[in-house]
Image: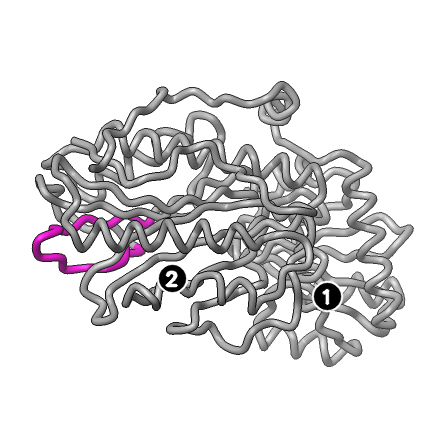
Amino acid sequence: MSRRATVAGNELKLVPRLKAVMEQEYPRFSDAEYARRHQQLAAVMEKAGVDHLLLVTSNRAGNATQWVTGWPGTVEAYTIFRPGVKMTMCMEWHNHFPLGKKIARDVDVHWGERQGTARTIAELRRRGARRVGIMGPLGISKYRQLEENFRIVSLDAQYVRLRLIKSDEEIDWLRIGAALTDLGLAALLSETKPGLTERELANIVERAYVGHGGTTMIHYIGCTSMAKPHIFVPPQYPSPRRVEQGDVIFCELSAFWWDYAGQILRTFTVDAEPTPLYRDLHATAEAAFDAVTRVVRHGTTMQEIVDAAGVIETNGFTTCDDLMHGFGGGYFPPILGTSSRPAGPLPEMTLEENMTVVVQPNVITREQSAGVQVGELIRVTRTGFERLHGAERGLFRVG
């Protein structure tokens, strides 16, 4: 039988050092943490033979700028980095400029007057730049403008490599993101009832963490009849469909703490026991999650992970999403599918200590008529894994 969901209310339970992070007006990593990142960038630059590095952010699409300066990026921003020289940032929108100056400390922040690319090129030329590395998204027209003035080297792959292994401070911020995400899930379990729309469910989730400083990365929530399901995966945008008795609800939730989000995937039924099909789907997903996490450790190969999830195919099902992906400050390798739904060639890498990954065996029927969401963010340790979320696992009943 399914269990009734029990929740403890909208209270963040964090250790004092994490509470101290959240009490800052605008949270910032330690000077030592930024120095570590800058040293890593300097090593990448030396190996690539570039004399300057340009970090780009655009409409929240990139986070290299935030990783280096603390500024999360609300519109286009260009940051010039060179070891031993004060960084320069050019921001496009004047109304975002005051906060940018406040958050990006130890950075010379300028308003780009809607000519950010031209002003950045002028600053690089003033500095005598010749060979410039780029990290972050850059449109083709702007790339060509830079290319007309400098030898350009893409360093996106090197940037991704720098982000795979998390520092202790980054893991702490992910713990906060996970706790905020857990609040959203707890509210959803507590307040879901027949008659609410998917849009109202999304509102319930957001309300739970916004007051604590969290922001939304994603809240994919879907509801469908267990007897006659019309979807097998939660939609990326909620619909006006109303929850009914006998529904199954599945969700994928991620709340940001300044670019460091938790991610949790759960399934629950509404005022009814799960049907045999949904019970089997969920049991298979839980078995796959347990099998995968049993092999997770420093040094685990990608093939070991895929093989561990074989219970999915053994039980006659498949998946609709990645089995595992790197997470935390971005969407990173390893990105793995299952044997029945590969995500491309297996990456030539192994898990490493302090990687953070989402394990999510989202099991569906082979004809794509019904499915469940199961999974969460974990940290890879030397000998196993650590849960970063505190929410209970299981197939719950609400309403």
Taking 198 as reference, is 41 above or below it?
Answer: below
Alpha-carbon span between mark 1 and mark 2: 35 Å
Taking 322 as reference, is 11 above or below it?
Answer: above
Circle on res. 311: 2
- Which amino acid lies under the numbered mark 1 shown in the image of this protein? Gln
- Which amino acid lies under the numbered mark 2 shown in the image of this protein? Val
Q: Quadrant of residue 137?
A: bottom right
Q: Give coordinates of residue 77: x percent, y percent.
A: 63, 55
How crowded is the residue under tag 2: few (<14 C-alpha within 10 Å), some, or many (20+)?
Answer: some
The residue that appears at 57% across and 49% down in the rendered structure is 328
The residue that appears at 42% across and 26% down in the rendered structure is 211
Q: Is residue 286 left or right of residue 238?
A: right
Magenta part of the protein: which range? 220-236
Q: Which residue is mark 1?
A: 158
Q: Give coordinates of residue 355: x percent, y percent.
A: 64, 51
Quadrant showing the C terminus: top left
Residue 275 vs residue 149, the one in the foreground: 275
Residue 226 drawn in magenta: yes
Q: Is residue 30 left or right of residue 223?
A: right
Q: Is residue 387 left or right of residue 45?
A: left
Q: Give coordinates of residue 184: x percent, y percent.
A: 37, 34
